Image: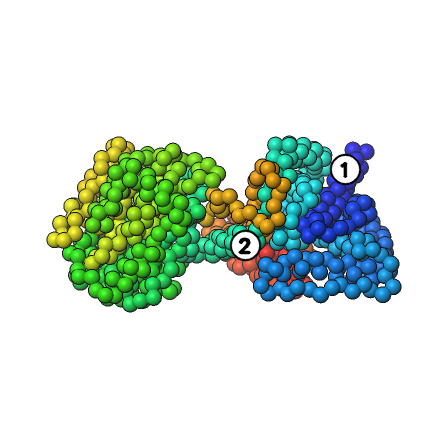
Amino acid sequence: MKQAFQSLLKILCDAALVAIAILSVPCAVLTAYQISYPLEPLILAAVSIGLVLSVWMHVPRFGIIAGGVYFAALIPLLIFNRKAVIYGFRLFRFTMVDLLAPDVPFLSAPGPVETIEGLKATPSEAIGWFVLLVMAILGLSVAWSLIRSKMIVLPVIVPLPIFMLALIYTDLPLAHWTVFLLMIYIGACLITGSLRAHEADRYGIVTLFTFAGLVILGLLIRWISPPETYEPISFERRQEIMSQKAQDIYDDLISAMKNRVKRTEDLTDEDRWERTDDPVMEVTASENGEFYLRAYSFGSYGKNRWNHSSEFDGTWKSMDALGNRATQSGESVVIAAEQSEMKYVPYGFVADHEPGTHESYIAANGNNQYGWQFSRNIPDAANVSPEESAYYEWACGQYIIEDEKTKDAILSFAKENGLVSSDDPYETAKRVAAFVHSVAEYTTEPGSIPDGADFVLYFLNEGKKGYCVHFASATTAILQAMDIPARYVFGYRFFAEEDRPTPVTDKSAHAWTEVYCPGIGWLPVESTAGEDQNLAEQTPAPTSTPEPTNTPTPEPIDESPEPEENTPTETPENGIDNETPEPVPTEEPQDNEGEDPEQSERQEPEGAAKKSRLGWLWLLLIPPAVVGGLWLTGKKVREKRQKLFSQEDAKQAILEMYHYLGRLKKYGVKIGNRANDLDKEAAFSNHVMSEERKEMKNIVTRAENELKKQPKWKVLIYKRVLFLL
């Protein structure tokens, strides 16, 4: 009796989930384009479809009957009303294109929709028949992914492509009840997904309580933040946001595959420092010392993010002589890097022209093992050539703060604290760095900035604590506000011993500032207070930098609280001010614009409170994020499986392979008796089983090849979703 009740509860809960998904998603699209439709018949259809599909998927022995009822009822009904279905589709397409055409260049205004001869249905009824077709197809996908696939994320992904149509033109409001229902569906799928796959007996009752909790939570959110107060946004603003989001997603996915030059550095979620022990490179240096290896830089600051530098269309290349025009070297360093798009560069490297040079980095071009000859000494300033003069003029317009209001606020802050520009940009940069160093304290958990706040201004005025990202951003932004070309740099800071390979990990990541000095080039400036708690080696005090003729030698930053570890107290020879930095997170968090979105032409009632509706746009990030997650998970699973199969203990490897074969067997693969015999022998015998391991590996290979002979769509699921291949 108890088991029958549990089964019935599971059927009813999943029927409700399917009905909610196939009703809310199409209706959200219709309301977003202000298309009238008959709601009551669609509710009845959604409930009926959900119930039939849930019985079909949950009770295999009645599958033929339930499936027969499903198709026997729907197909004739839709065929008999095919004219209404076609007319409803035309009406939907006309309304959607008509609204988007004025703002989308490649869409032209549609012609009028002609009534189909002999059609008796009204436009609203025709839309209803078209939606019924969509619900029938969507219901099959949702029910299979929810009940049969046993996957947690897939049921969430399936309805989203259709729901995205409602977000293309978001200044026409969605019906809030549709979003409310969709959130209940997504929440229930995610919360109860693990139970659905592993503890089916508890799934029904937990889902029931989850429904109740989500409904209460939704009503509470509606009460606290009434949807009537949400503010629409213009198409241009929405297009800008979506373009940036797409770029961020692309950068995240590519960065997961290799160390890639980022186009932006989003600062809005820099609330804590988090790094891993993932290897980055191995460095062998000719002398002991502290190293700053530069990876890439960012140009302009705006809307709480650093943006990528464009390329200078001229003969002067800033990276060819990075802060040094010397023709003789004093040291050498050999780098063996992990896969990377850029080379890691010391300051003062000696080269007439390095292939792959860009404005902000040097491309690796597949070369991940290379060496540098370099000098730590700052050279005398040379005469500024016409080519360099043209570059300097360009840099003054490139390395800027984009928003004038933000620039004025930062400049006003600088003047209030006695920071003014001088004829020597490097001296000015050192004074700014010393001030930023003294105004805040170092911490790896500074917390998030408030919504709408500027990252730099909040750090300087209120937060006053952070890590290298905060200090470097503030220093660079103040210099840019003074119209001094400066850029935000990402790289690695570590200590290397003479002629000994030094592993450099992600924990050595760091950020600092570069300032351009005519006649010399880009010089680094350090401003981070405190010390890097994750520096693997103690850094001995380096010798002082020889004083150049025309350019001041970098001086130590003003004294700060004594760090716990042994931190350098003199100016390093590489010209970088001598405060110890900390690693910088390079993950690209989600965007938070920090400003009110533009007003749309369609205004809310005057006097209503305004809130951004950008929250719904986050749903667009789910499909690409899931695809990237599945790709990465599959890669890790396959690597782990191969490691288990090739481990030194042959008997344990055979046991792991047999367990893997058991999984393949569930999907129709025949593994034979020999695999079972080898498994028992590995479990109970005492002899080495090297040859038996090879035999079991051959059985695994044949089983995988047999699985690959199934239909391609199944093989794709086995490989990309279930990670069997």
Asked if residue 190 is positioned above or below residue 247 in the image, the reply reads above
Which residue has dot 1 on it?
Answer: 9
Q: Residue at x 15, y 46 (%)?
A: 544
The residue under label 2 is 236
Discs 2, 1 touching: Cβ within 8 Å: no
Instruction: Identify which residue, 324 or 606, lies in the foreground.
Output: 606
| 538 w.r.t. 489: above or below | above
Q: Which of the two discs, 2 and 1, labels the residue nearer the N terminus?
A: 1
Circle number at residue 322? none
In the displayed structure image, the side of residue 690 where residue 479 appears, left or right: left
Q: Residues within 10 Å of mark 2 (few under 14, many from 20)?
A: few
Residue drawn at 67 percent across, 46 percent down: 174
Quarter-wise, where is residue 346 in the image?
bottom left
Q: Give above or below for 481 relative to 77.
A: above
Q: Is residue 607 left or right of residue 649?
A: right
Residue 374 position, x and y percent, is 22, 58
Of 558 and 17, which appears nearest the observer?
558
Q: Is residue 49 left or right of residue 429?
A: right
In this view, the residue in front, 420 or 710, is 420
Horizontal and vertical percent position of residue 600: 58, 49
**Does residue 291 show up?**
no
Q: Residue at x 38, y 39 (%)?
A: 457
Residue type indicated by callout 1: Leu
State the CA–CA distance, disc 2 to disc 1.
48 Å
Residue lying at 14% horizontally and 53% vertically, measured from the top left: 550
In the rendered structure, which amino acid carries the disc numbered 2?
Glu
